[in-house]
Structure formats: C-alpha cells, structure tokens
Amino acid sequence: MKKFVRVFAVLLCVVIAAFVTAGCADSEAKSAYDLAVENGYTGDVNEWLASLVGQDGKDGESVTDYLTDWYNSAKNDGYEGSFLDFLSDYESVMKSLGVSTNAYAVSKAIMSAVTIYSRYTVRSYSPFGGYTTKIAHSAGAGVILSDDKENGDAYIITNYHVVYESSSVAEDGIAEYIGVCLYGMSAQIDTSDATVLENSTVKAEFLGGSMDNDIAVIKISGSDTYKNSDCFPVTVADSDSVKLGQQAIAIGNPEGDGFSATTGTLSVDSEYITMDGLSGGTTTFRVMRVDTSINSGNSGGGLFDSSGNLIGIVNAKTSSSSIENISYAIPSSVAVGVAENVIRNDGTFDKRTLGVKWETTDSTAVYDEETYLTSIIQTVAVGEVTSGGASDGVLQQGDIIKSVTVKGKTTEVKRLYQVSDALLYADAGTQVTLEITRDGQDQSVTVTV
C-alpha cells in the first residue's frame, strides 16, 4: 500500500511451524530429537531443527513426513497419545528450550525478500484551474523470483500499485525511479535531493505486469551488491496445498521503515474480493484471507509458510473502524503465473483462455482423519462453450473436468479456479489436455490455446 495515496491494497500473513516432542509410556519421555539421535543423527538440537527447515527448502518440504515417522516410532515405543498430542508435547519442549522454529523460516524467507522505494513526479491540481508538479515517494516490498547471481541480475515480483501512480506525469504512470534494498541495507528518502535515494538503493527497472491482477515484475541488472550478497530466489510452495487455520509469515516494509515480519492465521484459502481499480472502476481478485496485522508499505511483500516458502503476495486489507485484522494475499499460483507470463512475453501479460465458462455443480467440506485437516472439494464443469472459441466442438456443456495438463504439469481439478490458474503458464499454440467425464464416461480431450 502506498503512503501518499489511498490504496486499499496491502499484505498478508505468516506461517509458523511447530515441531513436536514425543512422550513415551515409560517413566522417561523421549523427544523427537531423541528419536532422531537413536536413529543415527549426530548434531545438536539446533542443527537438527535447522536441517528440518533446510537451506534450499527441499528438506523443509518433508517435515510432515519426518514428524509422521517420529510419531510412529514413538507409538512403537509405547506412546499412547494422538498425533496432535505428539505435536503439542513437542512444541512445549521446544518452548522450554527457548527454540523458535519461526526463526528458521523467517531467516530463509527474508533472504528472498526486498523492500522497494518508488519516486514519482505527480500533478497537484489547483481548485482555480491548472496544476503544479511535485516529487512524491512510496514504499512497498517484493520477492526475488529468479536470478543470474554471477551477473548480478534478478527478477522481482511486487504489486503493480507499488510502482504505479495514476497522478504521475509519466504517461504510463510508472515510477521514474525504483530502488530496491536487500536485507541488511538501509534506504534513505529525501524529497529535496533525488540522489539520496539512488545512492542508498539498488536501481531496478520496470519490466511489465498486469494491472488487473495487481502484479508487476521489476528487474535489477549487473548489480555488484546483489552479486556479492547471500540473497537467493524464493522457494515457491504450491498455494493449492495451503489449509484453513495454518499460520503464515508476512515479510514487508511497513511505513517504509524497513524489513518486518508478522504472523497470523489463514482464515480463507480462496475467495474473491472486489476493490477500486488502479485506473478507475473496480477490479476483482482471487485472494487468500488472513488475520495478520498489515500496514502501509507491506504491499508486494511475500506471505510464507512454516518452511519459509512463498504461498502468496500480500496486496490488500479491509480498512474500517468496525473491522480488525482482515488482510489479503494473491495466491502464489496466480502471482508467479502472472510474473512468469510477463517475463516470457518481454513485459506483456498475455492472458490465455479456452473459450469456456466454468461452473461448480457441487461443493462440500471434507475432513481428513489422517491429517486432521479440512478442505473444500468442488465439482467443476463446463457451463458454456463460446461459439467459434478454442473449445468449440471439443468440450460440451455439462462436461466435468477431472484434471488439466499444461506443458507437462498435471493439476487435479478440485476447485473452480484451478483451470484458469493453470492457463497462466500457457502460450499461444499450447496444447492443453483435459481429463473429463461426459455422460458418465471418462475421456481425454486436447484443446489448443
């Protein structure tokens, strides 16, 4: 969210992991760390916790498997509690040791985060006609998507409204200077001296974006600062895997004062909100809802899970004296899909469709007794096929979509948004394979985008 204009866009929350000790039925309780040592682990407890999160995110992806294995081992040793009891026991022990698993997730995530400072020349209109100009600044955040470390290059995702101002004298409204700070750097803003900001930040160029999706891509090139830093691209989690009630970590730039991490709970895994558009009118976004505290300057920053992996880009909050802590983030599947689309198309967002209107014919909540998690499962069907469109003669009204495959990646379709999200990665001429059920019969069809 900008500091000098009224924008109802900001950032989201946080995911924290609670690792757990297992109590055994005998007189001396064993922790999960104890079990790891018994199975050959030689490091201390802090090294063990760090290994769970992992430096590249790959170890962290298996945390659930590790905990399940340790729980099963504990049961074999006589532990009688449930898996949730096991987690609770372990969390208590970690707290008694003064160990924060949050620290590992935040430390990883913050090395993929940046703060962003934009400068504009804006119009100031007179009530008597005409206008003058002045310099204005805004602050936001972003996430490193990919890089060429050897050459000091990096692509960064942020919100479009972080680098755009409708009152700018620039025809496209894009900031005349965009400065980036890596963690450990400190930016300075001085409206009387334009060189102050430039001397304290890494210069970034606007590559392109989608105003309707509130996603922009900026790029730093040939930066010795980045080349010599320990920063690295973010590990992107599958935002379809996020679950109701999980915690989330938001890293942003509140009030433009630098890096800050906040925590909260995922309230809604997917919903649609309508808000004022950047160029007028209204825009509808698919978002995740959280209760994390969000402030001006958090826009464009990442929402991370308990392993420090990206699950969303914070972009909005509800601002009302009667409502507290309702904030939103664009799911990583959308944010990264749009960003990679922009990069592939040299700065232009190239939206692809199948010429179909989708609908849900059934929606229900499912509770998994093994994982103790609840999910929404929808039946997604073809509501209407556009005459002369890509799917005309291939898909029919009433076809139920079971899965969609784009460029070799198959997504099992359990939610309405999944087909359109998958198409963000398609280009003109891409062949999309759909597994469908028609009149009770399963079949496979191919549509050329």
Image (cartoon, helix red, strand yellow):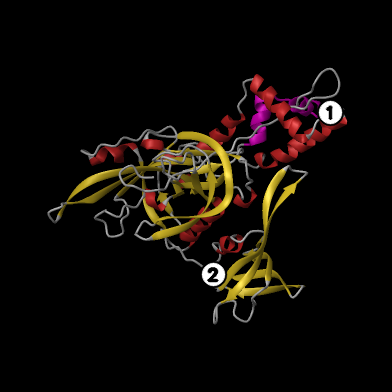
Whether residue 328 is situated above or below residue 448 in the rendered picture: above
Which of the image's four quarters has the C terminus? bottom right
Residue lying at 70% horizontally and 44% vertically, measured from the top left: 373
> What range of the chain is rendered magenta?
32-54
Is residue 111 visible to us here?
no
Residue type, label 2: Thr
Say whether residue 34 is left or right of residue 312. right
Q: Nearer the viewer, residue 100 or 294?
A: 294
- Asked which quadrant contains residue 3, the reply is top left
Crowding near the residue tagged with mark 2, few <14, some 14–19, many ≥20 C-alpha atoms within 10 Å: some
Q: Looking at the image, can residue 361 be seen?
A: yes
Kindly give the residue lying farthest to the front in the view shown: 322
Residue at screen point 61% across, 61% down: 416
Q: Which residue is mark 1?
A: 79
Considering only vertical position in the picture, is 11 above or below 33?
A: below
Secondary structure of the magenta portion, mostly? helix
Tag shown at residue 353: 2
Residue 280, numbered label: none
Q: Is residue 238 above or below residue 78?
A: below
- Measured from the top left, where is residue 331 in percent x and y? 54, 51
Relative image position of residue 21 (x, y in whole percent): 74, 27
Q: Secondary structure at mark 2?
A: loop
Left or right, 228 with respect to 401, comes to left
Q: Amino acid at mark 1?
A: Tyr
Q: Which of 434/196 is in front?
A: 434
Q: Dot 1, crowdedness within 10 Å: few (<14), some or many (≥20)?
A: some
Quadrant where the image shows the N terminus: top left
Q: Which of the two residues, 246 or 404, is positioned nearer the viewer here?
A: 246
Left or right position of 448 against 365: left
